[in-house]
C-alpha cells in the first residue's frame, strides 16, 4: 500500500513521488522502444527493455506490471515475437493502471500532488505501489532506469 511506500522512504513523500515520476517517464519511453523493436523483429531489444521494466516495477512492488514485463522478457529471450504485441498491450494497460492508482493516491492529499492532477481512470483497480525493503531500507543510489537501489 502507498502508506507503506512512504514509510519505506522514511516519510519522504516528495522523494517517493520523484522516484515514481522518473519510473513513469522511463517506462513510457521503454514501451515505445519495445513497440518499435517488435515491428523490426528485434527480440534482443524487447528482452532488454522488458527486463529493465520488470526490475524497476519489482523494486516498487508493482507486481502485476513486473510479472507482465517478465512474460515479455521471456518472449524476447525466445526470439519468437508472435505474441509480443498482445503482451505489450497488457503491459501498457497495467502501466496506465499504476499511473492512475498513484495519481488517485496523490490527489487524496499527498504533498506535491498537483503534478498528478488530471490522470484518467483506467476502469480497473491498479496494482499496489510500495517500496520493497529487501535489506536495510535505506535508499542510497539511483540506477540507470531511475529507480533507487538499496545498498
Image (cartoon, grey):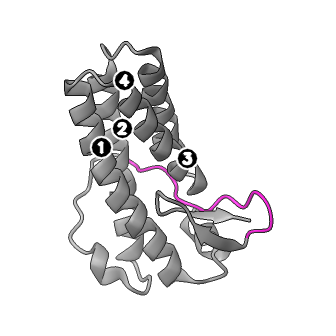
Q: Is residue 96 in view?
A: no
- Per the rendering, the mark at residue 43 is 4
Cβ–Cβ under 8 Å for marks 2 and 3: no
Q: Quadrant of residue 89?
A: top left
Instruction: Find residue 6 and report its horizontal and vertical position in percent.
Output: 59, 75
Q: Which of marks 4 and 2 precedes in the sequence?
A: 4
Q: Choose between 108 and 72: the one closer to the eye.
A: 72
Q: Residue furthest toward the right?
A: 136
Cβ–Cβ under 8 Å for marks 1 and 2: yes
Q: Choose between 139 and 109: the one closer to the eye.
A: 139
Q: How many marks?
A: 4
Q: Nearer the viewer, mark 2 or mark 3?
A: 3
Q: Nearer the viewer, mark 1 or mark 4?
A: 4
3D distance between C-alphas at marks 1 and 3 = 15 Å
Q: Quadrant of residue 48?
A: top left
Q: Which of marks 4 and 1 precedes in the sequence?
A: 1
Q: Quadrant of residue 131?
A: bottom right
Q: Nearer the viewer, mark 1 or mark 2?
A: 1
86 in relation to 56, above or below: above
Viewport quadrant of the C terminus: bottom right
Cβ–Cβ under 8 Å for marks 1 and 3: no
Secondary structure, mark 4, is: helix
Q: Which of marks 3 and 2 precedes in the sequence?
A: 3
Instruction: Find residue 23 and report its horizontal and vertical position in percent.
Output: 42, 60
Secondary structure, mark 2, is: helix
Q: Which of marks 4 and 3 precedes in the sequence?
A: 4
- Per the rendering, the mark at residue 31 is 1
Residue tagged 2? 91
Residue drawn at x 36%, y 67% as measured from the top left: 104
Residue tagged 3? 55
Amino acid at each position: 500500500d502507498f502508506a507503506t511506500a512512504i514509510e519505506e522512504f522514511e516519510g519522504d513523500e516528495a522523494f517517493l513521488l520523484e522516484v515514481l515520476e522518473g519510473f513513469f517517464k522511463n517506462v513510457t519511453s521503454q514501451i515505445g522502444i519495445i513497440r518499435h523493436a517488435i515491428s523490426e523483429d528485434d527480440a534482443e531489444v524487447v528482452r532488454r527493455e522488458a527486463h529493465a521494466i520488470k526490475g524497476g516495477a519489482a523494486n516498487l512492488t508493482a507486481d502485476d506490471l513486473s510479472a507482465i514485463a517478465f512474460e515479455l522478457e521471456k518472449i524476447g529471450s525466445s526470439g519468437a515475437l508472435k505474441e509480443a504485441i498482445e503482451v505489450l498491450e497488457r503491459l501498457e494497460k497495467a502501466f496506465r493502471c499504476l499511473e492512475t492508482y498513484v495519481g488517485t493516491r496523490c490527489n487524496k492529499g499527498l504533498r506535491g500532488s498537483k503534478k498528478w492532477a488530471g490522470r484518467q481512470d483506467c476502469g480497473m483497480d491498479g496494482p499496489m505501489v510500495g517500496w520493497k525493503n529487501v535489506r536495510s531500507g535505506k535508499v542510497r543510489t539511483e540506477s540507470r532506469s531511475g529507480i533507487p537501489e538499496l545498498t
